Amino acid sequence: MSQTDTVLQAPCRLSESVIWSLQRSFYEAEGPAAWKPRGVPFWMTSSVFFAQAMARVVLGFLRDLAAASGKGALDTSAMNGEEYVYRLVAYLTTGDSVTSPADTAIAGARHIAVLTSTLPGILGLSPDGRDLIYAVQSDDAYEDIEADDRAGVLWLSTSLLDRVDRLTWTGAFAGPIIRVSSPSDVAIDTARSVGWIASPSEGRILSYSVSSSVISIINTPQEPRVVEVGSADGTVWVGSRQGTVYRYSSQGIDSLLDAWPVGGQVIAMALDGRGSRAFVATRSRLDGTADSLRIVDVLDSTVTTQPYALTNLADLAFDPATHQLWISERGAPRQGEGRLSRASQDGSLLQSWAPLEPFGIDLDAGGTCWVADLRSQRVLAITAGGLIALWTPRMEAPYQVRVGDPVP
C-alpha cells in the first residue's frame, strides 16, 4: 500500500461494508433504470445459459458427493440431458428436491409450451407446470403456435419476419425455416402430418410437409386471417378479415366447397371434430366492444349468432369428447376484467371465470382447458368440471399456451 492510499474501512463482511450500503443506495435511487443501456452489466448473471452452466457444476458436485458417501443417488432416470438442470434451481427456490420423485421429468409425459411477449420467445415448462425447463428467445414475438403431437413438433409463425419456425418440445429446431410472406395463423393436420399456413398479404393458404415441401396452395377471394383443419375429413376452413368463412377440400386450387358471410372480421375459429360445425369469433368494431360468437352448420348451411355480448374475443377451443366450447374473452386490454367461459355445443353459456384477462387457450386429452392469463401472469388449468386444477409460477406476459399429450 502506498502512502497516498486511504483505508476507508477495516476488513469486514461484505454485508457490513460501506460498499454494500453504497450499492443499495444506488439501486434504490435508480430503480429499473439501473439496467438501461450503459448501466449495470447484467447479461451474464441473467443469462439462462449461464444459469444452466452453474447448475450443471453444482449438480455434478452433488452427484459425486452422493456416489462417494454411498448414502443415496440422484434421480438420473428423471433427467433428460441438460434440460432438467432446472430441478436444482427449483430446489433452491421452491423446495422441489433434486432427488424428489420423478413428478416433473417423466419420459413420455405431458409437454407445456408458453409464448411470452417480453422475452420474446417460447418457454418450456415441466409436466406439472411448476418449473421452467428451457427458454428459447426469438427475433420477434410469435403470432401463433400449433402442435403436431404425433411428430412432437411445434409450428410457430412470425408475421413480421416472414417465417414459420418448427421446434421440438425441448426447444430444439426440428427442421428448416419455412419462408412465407407475413404468416398469421397455423393449423396442423396431425393425421396427415401436414401444416397449413395463412398468408394474408398473398391472399392464400399453403400446406407444407414435414420436409418443408409445398404440398398445395389455396387462393382465397378475401384476405385470410384464420385457418383450421378438420381432423375427420381433412377439410380446410378459412376465416377472412372481410367477414367470410370458407370451406375447402385439401386438394388445393379450385377446391372451394362452401362459403358463409359471418358479419365481421374473423378473429378465431374452432371445429367440432366431425367437420359438420364451426364456431367462429367475429369482430364488427375495431375496439372489440361488439364481438360475436357465430355457429356455422355445414349440414343445413346456416349461420347462428349467439344472443350475448362479448368483449375482445381472443380464442376458442372445442372439446369433442364433452361437446363443450371454451371461450377466451380478454375484455379491455390491461384491465384484467375479461372472462373464460364454458359453453354447450349450441353456444349456451354454462360457466364463467372472472376477473381474468385470458388470451390463448388449449385443451389437453383429458378435456382440461389451459389458459394464458395476462391478469395473473400465469397459465391456469381448468378441468371440464370447472375446477382450477393448476396454476404455474408467474411469467412475463404469457399470451399463448400449447399442451402436448403422450401419443400411444
Image: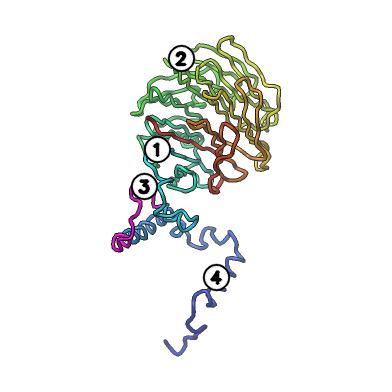
Residue type at mark 1: give it: Leu
Residue 336 shown left or right of residue 193 in the figure = right
Q: Mark 2 or mark 4: which comes first in sequence?
A: 4
Q: CA distance from mark 2 to mark 1?
A: 28 Å
Mark 2 — residue? 249
**Which quadrant of the view contains residue 370?**
top right
Q: Which residues are magenta?
A: 64-86
In the rendered picture of this protein, how many numbered marks are placed on residues? 4
The residue that appears at 55% across and 12% down in the rendered structure is 298
Q: Is residue 84 above or below residue 168?
A: below
The label on residue 78 is 3
The answer to whether mark 2 and mark 4 are in CB contact below 8 A is: no
Q: Mark 1 or mark 3: which comes first in sequence?
A: 3
The colour scheme of the drawn protein is rainbow
Helix, strand or loop under label 4: helix
Q: Nearer the viewer, residue 28 or 74?
A: 74
Mark 1 — residue? 167
Q: Mark 2 or mark 3: which comes first in sequence?
A: 3
Q: Nearer the viewer, residue 111 or 359?
A: 111
Helix, strand or loop under label 1: strand
Give the foreground label among 4 and 3: 3
- Binning the other alpha carbons within 10 Å of mark 2 as few (below 14), some (14 to 19) or many (20 upward) gives some
Q: CA distance from mark 2 to mark 3?
A: 44 Å
Q: CA distance from mark 4 to mark 3?
A: 41 Å
Asked if residue 65 lies in the magenta stretch, the reply is yes
Residue type at mark 4: give it: Gln
Mark 4 — residue? 23
Q: CA distance from mark 1 to mark 3?
A: 22 Å
